[in-house]
Image: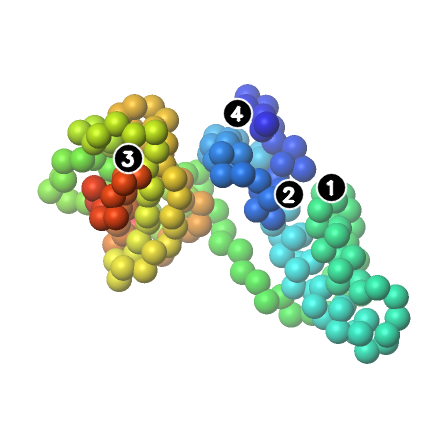
């Protein structure tokens, strides 16, 4: 069980969230806390940097280990360190930077500010709601007028139809439900499609824009 928003998340909780080793309800609880806690947001960003660094360097170390036919691969041990507390990650990352000159083949999307909340209403407005680019989003989806259901399936798609995110959607503050988008979306048009548990076709569709 994860801690409430009144308490900070532990390093172990954040590590399991990054490695996708938590259930969907637990991940949703972490995301809800991150929306309101800047300290945990900062700690998550630091942990992601260390994790991505170790993942990028580990294959190089494993290749050298295989050539030397020596002890078990350092790359494997590094991935084991990823599951250890933050101090071990910091030590491993600092050691790698000090000893090896390795191109970093990863990219982190900078969080430029707090999340932006967009309200997606059942009645279409004259113009779609807009949010600035480079910011995490909280989509407040109106469920009024829909047949009651314990959950819905929500699908976020780009203007060209490519699906970006799919997840279950549960009513958080009826008649609304929250759909969080942690990644930074580039400028463009987007659609959030809502599916019922027994519907192959979307039962409601919302449009919004990133500028």
Residue 185 shows in the view: yes
> Residue drawn 62% across and 56% down?
52
> Residue drawn 25% across and 32% down?
142
Image position, residue 158 (x, y; %): 30, 56
Label 3 crowd (10 A; few <14 / some 14-19 / many >=20): many
Q: Nearer the viewer, residue 149 or 63?
A: 149
- Dot 4 or dot 3: first in sequence order is 4
Label 4 crowd (10 A; few <14 / some 14-19 / many >=20): some
Q: CA distance from mark 4 to mark 3?
A: 22 Å
Q: Is 167 left or right of 37, judged from the image as shown? A: left
Q: Is 92 left or right of 16, judged from the image as shown? A: right
- Seen as rendered, the residue at the extreme front is 198
User: Which mark is nearer the camera, 4 or 3?
Assistant: 3
Task: Report which residue position mark 3 lands on.
Answer: 141
Task: Report which residue position mark 2 lands on.
Answer: 15
Contact (Cβ within 8 Å) of mark 2 with mark 1: yes
Contact (Cβ within 8 Å) of mark 4 with mark 3: no
> Residue drawn 70% across and 65% down?
57
Q: CA distance from mark 3 to mark 1?
A: 37 Å
Label 1 crowd (10 A; few <14 / some 14-19 / many >=20): some
- Dot 1 or dot 4: first in sequence order is 4
Task: Report which residue position mark 4 lands on.
Answer: 5
Task: Report which residue position mark 1 lands on.
Answer: 85
Q: CA distance from mark 3 to mark 2?
A: 29 Å
Q: CA distance from mark 2 to mark 4?
A: 18 Å
Q: CA distance from mark 2 to mark 1?
A: 8 Å
Q: Nearer the viewer, residue 3 or 43?
A: 3
Could you tell me which secondary element the residue under label 4 belongs to?
Answer: loop
> Residue drawn 59% across and 67% down?
105
**187 lies above or below 71:** above
- Dot 3 or dot 1: first in sequence order is 1
- Seen as rendered, the residue at the extreme left is 126
């Amino acid at each position: 069980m994860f801690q409430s928003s009144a308490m900070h998340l532990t390093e172990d909780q954040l590590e399991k969230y990054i490695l996708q080793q938590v259930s969907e309800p637990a991940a949703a609880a972490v995301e809800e806390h991150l929306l309101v806690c800047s300290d945990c947001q900062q700690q998550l960003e630091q942990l992601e940097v260390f994790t991505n660094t170790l993942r990028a360097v580990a294959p190089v170390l494993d290749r050298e280990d295989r050539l030397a036919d020596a002890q078990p691969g350092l790359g494997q041990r590094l991935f084991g360190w990823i599951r250890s507390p933050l101090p071990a990650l910091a030590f491993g990352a600092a050691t790698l930077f000090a000893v090896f000159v390795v191109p970093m083949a990863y990219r982190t999307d900078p969080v430029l500010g707090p999340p932006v909340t967009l309200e997606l209403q059942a009645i279409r407005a004259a113009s779609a709601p807009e949010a600035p680019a480079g910011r995490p989003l909280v989509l407040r989806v109106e469920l009024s007028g829909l047949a009651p259901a314990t959950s819905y399936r929500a699908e976020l798609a780009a203007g060209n139809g490519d699906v970006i995110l799919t997840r279950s959607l549960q009513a958080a503050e009826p008649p609304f439900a929250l759909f969080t988008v942690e990644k930074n979306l580039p400028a463009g048009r987007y659609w959030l499609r809502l599916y019922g548990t027994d519907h192959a076709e979307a039962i409601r569709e919302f449009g919004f824009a990133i500028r």
